[in-house]
Image: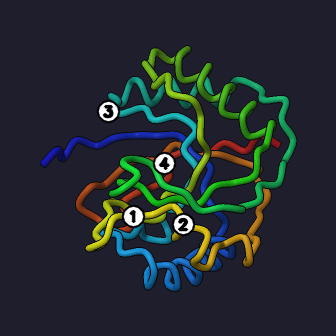
Amino acid sequence: MNTNTHYFIAVGLPEDVRHKVETERNKLKQAFPFKKWVHPQDYHITLAFLGAATEEQRIELTAILNEDTYDIDSFTLNINKLGVFGSQDSPRIFWLGVEENLTLHRLRENVYEKCKKAGFTLETRPFHPHITLARKWAGSEKFSHDMLMSEFTLAEANPSFQVEQFSLFQTHLNKEPKYEAIYTKKFV
């Protein structure tokens, strides 16, 4: 098992939204048999996955994040859909998505540029903002996208929240919750 500490930059969810999502997640667990459900304190939207990082790299990154400006005001994200990543028959990630938001994409681009400036090599996959709920399909039947439509969805709860900051998180693989914010930057 890989026990290296990894780092990422993400938008965390406020406590009240985490609680709403957790309440709905408990209902979803009945209909969607995934092997591992994410701890509510670990809900986030990843902006940049950094992987392993030395203390010097983290110090340089936080200095860049502190010095630079963001030209972004507070904005609202609306959680509005369920989805999966991976095999269509046996997905590896079950997630909540947010409405399309250009400010979120601009924030992600800003954060990406600052991470590159600090010397990090980042993924080049397209940005699909999401909140991971669970991992590894464990159902005896094949997963079907019709299940996403036929079962309760979080659109009924319509959680939304203001984004005013992002954080650098450290991963603790053998703890729960496993993500710890070690630096936070308010951009308003």
- Marks 2 and 1: in contact by CB < 8 Å? no
Which residue is under mark 2? 146
Disc 1 target residue? 143
Distance between mark 3 and mark 1 Cα atoms: 33 Å
Residue tagged by mark 4?
A: 182
Whether the residues at callouts 4 and 2 have beta carbons within 8 Å, the answer is: no
The amino acid at mark 4 is Ile
Q: Residues within 10 Å of mark 1 (few under 14, many from 20)?
A: some
Q: CA distance from mark 4 to mark 1?
A: 37 Å
Residue sitting at x 73%, y 44%: 186
Rendered view: 84 above or below 31: above
Q: Nearer the viewer, mark 4 or mark 2?
A: 2
Residue assigned mark 3: 52
Q: Residue 46 falls in which quadrant of the image?
A: top right
Of helix, strand and loop, which one carries label 3? loop
Instruction: Quote the CA–CA distance across marks 1 and 2.
Output: 9 Å
Helix, strand or loop at mark 1: loop
In the picture, measured across the screen, residue 165 lies left or right of residue 113, that is right
How far apart are the two marked residues, 3 and 2, measured between alpha carbons?
38 Å
Sequence-earlier tag: 4 or 2: 2
